Image (cartoon, rainbow, N blue to C red):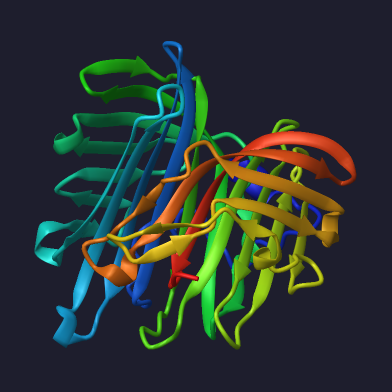
Amino acid sequence: MTKSAEKKRMGVVMEQLELNGCLPEQTTHNNNSWFAFGRYEAEGHVIDYLFHIMQLEFPKIMGGRKYQSVVMVFDETTGEYYAKDYLFKPSQVTSNTEHFYLKLPNGLMEGTWNDMHLMINEKPAEFYLDIHTSAVHYPVVSGGTSVFELLGMCIHQFSVPYMKTKGNFVWKERSYDITDKGFTWFDRQWQQLNMKNTIKWSWMAIYLDNGDVISVLDCDAPGYETGLLANLKTDGTQINGMGHRAVLPFKQGESDYYYNPNSKQEYPAHWEIHIPKINTKLEVIPFKKEQDIASVMSQLSKYEGVCKVDGTYHGEPVTGTALVELIGSWPKH
């Protein structure tokens, strides 16, 4: 992947992004995010996982620095779903700023793009993941440069959607060999977060059946409404777009809301999204509606939904799958 990333390609400028140096925690920023999810077909089942580690700097009155760890596992075949989040103190976490190494009580992320090791040990759910991944394709470079403005913040973000995966997945005493039976998507983000800002966005990480990828974001916070598109083609070229001329507001196509009394959030569970920049219209429907995570800190509750995708892409019929993330305040209608 490193060689692919260094190649000049349409729509991408790599000067502001140092792929390996950006993996460890960026201590000059108060918010770091490492986000991995995968979808695999093994032993007659289709199984998804998510592992998200986020470093947050809260005011001292709220406890100061914390690390949020989110795990999710979903068996699309049986409909079984489990999700849990934790807040750990720095004393419970090992974070190496020289090379990529993050160890928490319930898991581990470490390594390089050529050999990244991810491990989850979620005892309450009898869920254990131990995999090695390696990047085999181009990165999705958000905004075309990996730096863009959102919610009044300067955000650094890029994703590697095709990480070849080797290892095992154990859930409820059943073991699955997922070697070469799917891919891991790894997303890296960091910024200087203003905790006073109203935060609300929808992000869709979309795999299409032709191998192309769409990363599309819609921000719905008052005064900061916008859209962000990165469309990665199989040849490495990328089409970028910013604003509602590129991506229509998601709320225009949201429906099928449901309310979770635990998180006090009401999320949409059906989207019809329109991306004029690439002549694309997609219907996005969760395989299971209830895929939200009620956090131990209510402000951190969110939706992480595995979805099926159907519609037209560059004017041609297409199908695919997606992970939909809904962040922020989603009050009851």
The answer to whether residue 12 is visible is: yes
Q: Is residue 293 above or below residue 220?
A: above
Q: Is residue 84 above or below residue 173?
A: below
- Which residue is situated farthest in the right direction here? 315
Residue 278 falls left or right of residue 306: right
Task: Choose between 82 and 10: the one closer to the eye.
Answer: 82
- Which residue is situated farthest in the front direction here? 333
At a point 52% along the width and 31% down the height, the residue shown is 183
At a point 44% along the width and 59% down the height, the residue shown is 21
Residue 239: name its quadrant.
bottom right
The location of residue 75, given as percent across then percent down, is: 40, 28
The answer to whether residue 26 is visible is: no
Q: Is residue 76 above or below residue 57?
A: above
Quadrant holding the N terminus: top right
Count all numbered tags in the image, as a single digit.
0
The location of residue 285, given as percent across then percent down, is: 60, 43
Task: Choose between 87 and 164: the one closer to the eye.
Answer: 87
Residue 251: name its quadrant.
bottom right
At a point 66% along the width and 64% down the height, the residue shown is 250
Residue 316 falls left or right of residue 84: right
Residue 293 falls left or right of residue 59: right
Residue 299: name its quadrant.
bottom left
